[in-house]
Image (tube, rainbow, N blue to C red):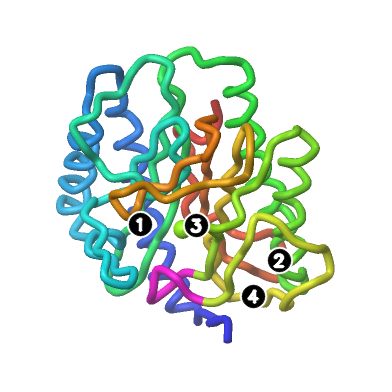
Amino acid sequence: MIPIKSAKEVEKMRQACRTASEVLDRVSETIRPGVSTKEIDEVAADLMEEAGVKSAFLGYRLGHRVFPGNICISLNDEVVHGIGSQRRIQYGDIVKLDIGVIQEGWVGDTATTVAVGVVDDRVEQLLRVTESALDRAISVAREGTRLGDICAEIEDEAVRNHFSVVREFVGHGVGRRLHEEPQIPNYGKRGSGPKLKAGMTLAIEPMINMGTAAVRLLDDGWTVRTTDGMPSAHFEHTVLITKDEPEILTWRAKTQLR
Ligand code: MG
């Protein structure tokens, strides 16, 4: 069952998502060469405390593993779920920031990829394509659309630019819990899957690789990296399905467009 949020619940989601995007905005601003990813994680923790919200990722359990970071920070060939460490940001890196907050029992989830200074043209293109894949997915998300239509938009945008789509990790419904039904793969068939309904809140999150789609898990039990060492990009919005245009609950006016 895909949860449908009432008007009152949607208002709670709006709040949580607004906070998540504000935190993401401010954390993005702290990224510069020389700063450690641990310091970035600590800034995020301070901002969440200041806002009176909790991290949706800190303490997240997967089997016997417990996520130790406040946010996910993944560099270059790391795809998702990177953990803040003593490693320092370098000029030319791409930094994926994924932020989930819990505000009054409701979760907002959003991610972006930040280029540190000038990056290779093909890397710049990877970022642009991943963001436009998200944009294309959102643009078809409305009542009556099939879930597979969203997934196909993402895959299409990646493939037509000769990039590949990560298959092991997916977008998801979000609300009272970080991960609700449905799973939203970044690939799929148009016309397949359940029909979307107004009141669904979905975290759509393309993860697109420059080289092979294959990924592997690092020894820390969390960080996911491309097997060929080539870069990966990630953008995510929490979106409210309506009868018309979807509402992007985690929209950020300031740093949305490069
Ligand atoms: Mg997510």
Classify mark 3: residues with Cα within 10 Å, few (<14), some (14-19) or many (20+). Answer: many
Q: Amino acid at mark 2?
A: Arg
Q: Nearer the viewer, residue 147 or 61?
A: 61
Q: Amino acid at mark 4?
A: Ala
Label disc, if present, on residue 249 of the rendered structure: 3
State the extent of the magenta-drawn residues as a range. Answer: 174-180
Q: Is residue 179 magenta?
A: yes
| Mark 1 secondary-structure assignment | strand
Q: Which residue corresponds to mark 4?
A: 198
- Please name the residue shown 56% across and 60% down the image: 170
Specify whether tag 1 is near ligand 1 (CB below 8 Å).
Answer: yes
User: How many angstroms separate mark 2 from mark 3 (CA)?
Assistant: 14 Å
Q: Nearer the viewer, residue 241 or 156?
A: 156
| Mark 3 secondary-structure assignment | loop
| Mark 2 secondary-structure assignment | loop
Left or right: where does residue 161 sit relative to residue 197?
right
First in residue order: circle 1 vs circle 3: 1
First in residue order: circle 4 vs circle 2: 2
Q: Which residue corresponds to mark 1?
A: 100
Q: Which residue corresponds to mark 2?
A: 142
| Magenta: main secondary structure | loop
User: How many angstroms separate mark 1 from mark 2 (CA)?
Assistant: 23 Å
x then y, percent, for residue 77: 47, 34
Residue situated furthest bottom in the rendering: 1
